[in-house]
Amino acid sequence: MKLTFSPASPFARKVRIAAIELGLIDKIELTPATVAPGTANEDYSKITPLKKLPVLITNDGDVILDSYVIVEYLNEMAGGSLIPDYGPQRWKAKTNHSLINGMLDSMLLCRYEKMVRPQGLQWQAWSDDHWNRAWTGMARFENMPDVLNGPFDISQIGLVCVLGYADFRFADCGWRKAYPKLDAFHQKMLERPSVKISVPPAA
């Protein structure tokens, strides 16, 4: 299998962590890809018109989009437990992950607004609104001991990627001071090889 990725992508990191935990990382070829707003990449657009990372290309040539769907595919392949099979816990995990993905989307948009949009065209109120979505999402998880202290699953993986991306792109945002329970959770997670090895490179 092939996984398109960038070391900076929190979405690709999510899949890499899952693949390591499921014992599948050696079956996946990591294929670097570069995507950026306003920049054409015709070859990648042929793989996915959305031009987003990551994409998994199976041994049969099928293209699987979206980091959650890829994790679900790998989890099923390995008979893993990263996503509950059924019942209330499944829907809770999927809901938590939807919140996490939305937080990552908002953080990425803040990054693009600051670094990619031309000077004079930036919309501060829009950027502030998106950052507030991520920030209040952190506040919600700060008060969710069932996630912070629960079994290692898609919710914890996604949350690790949120906090890692905050460190990577918003190092001065102060999340550790504001959310000490998230800080303790993150430090504990960094003891896992899959989390530690996938930390983004220094910005």
Image (cartoon, rainbow, N blue to C red):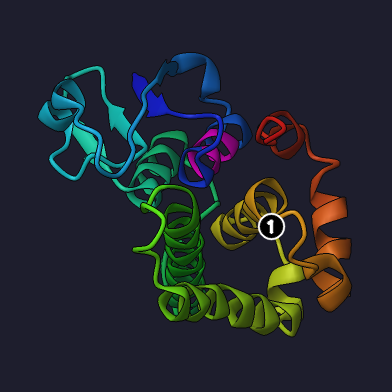
Please tell me which residue lies in front, 22 or 37: 37
Q: Position of residue 23 (x, y in %)?
A: 58, 27
Residue that label 1 marks:
163
Q: Residue at 47% x, 74% y: name it.
A: 124
Q: Position of residue 53 (x, y in %)?
A: 36, 38
Q: Is residue 56 magenta?
A: no
Q: Residue at 72% x, 51% y: name it.
A: 167
Could you tell me the amino acid type at mark 1? Leu
Q: Is residue 14 magenta?
A: yes
State which region is magenta.
13-18
Q: Position of residue 135 (x, y in %)?
A: 63, 76
Q: Farthest residue in the front direction? A: 120
Q: Residue at 87% x, 52% y: name it.
A: 187
Q: Residue at 76% x, 35% y: name it.
A: 196
Residue 197 is drawn in which quadrant?
Answer: top right
Identify whether 147 is placed above or below 72. below
Left or right placement of residue 20 versus residue 24 in this view: right
